[in-house]
Image: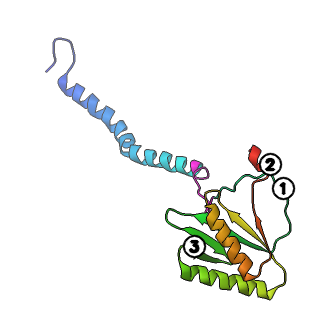
Amino acid sequence: MTSQWGWNIRSARNEKRSRSDWVAPFVAAAPWVTLLVLLLMLHLMGGVFTISRGTLFDLPAAAAGDSERTDLAMLVLPTAHDTLVFFDDARYVMSDPQSMHVFSTQLEEVAARKGEHTILVLADRRVACGELMRIADIVRTAGIGRVLFAAKTQGELEE
């Protein structure tokens, strides 16, 4: 069965089969090659997308540069519904009276252990001034004489 142009249908089919025989392994391996390239890209970019654990808070800016050595510190962060106070590996909720009572007794115990204290308050700039005054009042009532509110330094403002 030769056509008028000089080629045989059976030989054309055999040529097509012989071409597909060497292509078949590459077609079968294509998903695995794609997977390896994807894994390589994820491995190379893994360090870029690493998320470190922690809490990001933004200190307010202030012109004052006075500071003194402190041995106590607390962190005050606002959330959607409450303001949280972190002190001595514990979390206290400012809207909960029971939690604030426990916080004040904890401060009293710390103040009784040592003499005169200065406490450093790291408060996010979104914390309301009234809540900071309430914290300062609780600290004063607990027997801690000085409260130092942290602020960004001039070097941090330029960044």
- State the residue position of label 1: 65
Q: In this picture, is 112 found above or below 14?
A: below
Q: Nearer the viewer, mark 2 or mark 3?
A: 3
The quadrant holding residue 146 is bottom right
Start-end of magenta stretch = 45-56
- Report which residue position mark 2 lands on: 154
Quarter of the rendering containing residue 70 = bottom right
Q: CA distance from mark 1 to mark 2?
A: 9 Å
Indicate whether 159 appears above or below 126: above
Name the secondary structure under disc 1. Answer: loop
Check disc 1 and give the amino acid type.
Gly
Estimate the x, y position of residue 9 in percent, counting from the top left: 18, 24
- Nearer the observer: mark 1 or 2; the answer is 1
Question: Which tag, 3 or 1, sits closer to the chain's start?
Answer: 1
Q: Which circle's residue, 2 or 3, is located before the other in the chain?
A: 3
Q: Secondary structure at mark 3?
A: loop
The residue shown at (36%, 37%) is 23
Few, some or many residues within 10 Å of mark 3 (<14, 14–19, 20+): many
Looking at the picture, tell me which residue is in the foreground, 25 or 42: 42
The span from disc 3 to disc 1 (Cα, nearest Å) is: 29 Å
Whether residue 49 is in magenta: the answer is yes
Q: Amino acid at mark 2?
A: Gln
Label annotation for residue 138 = none
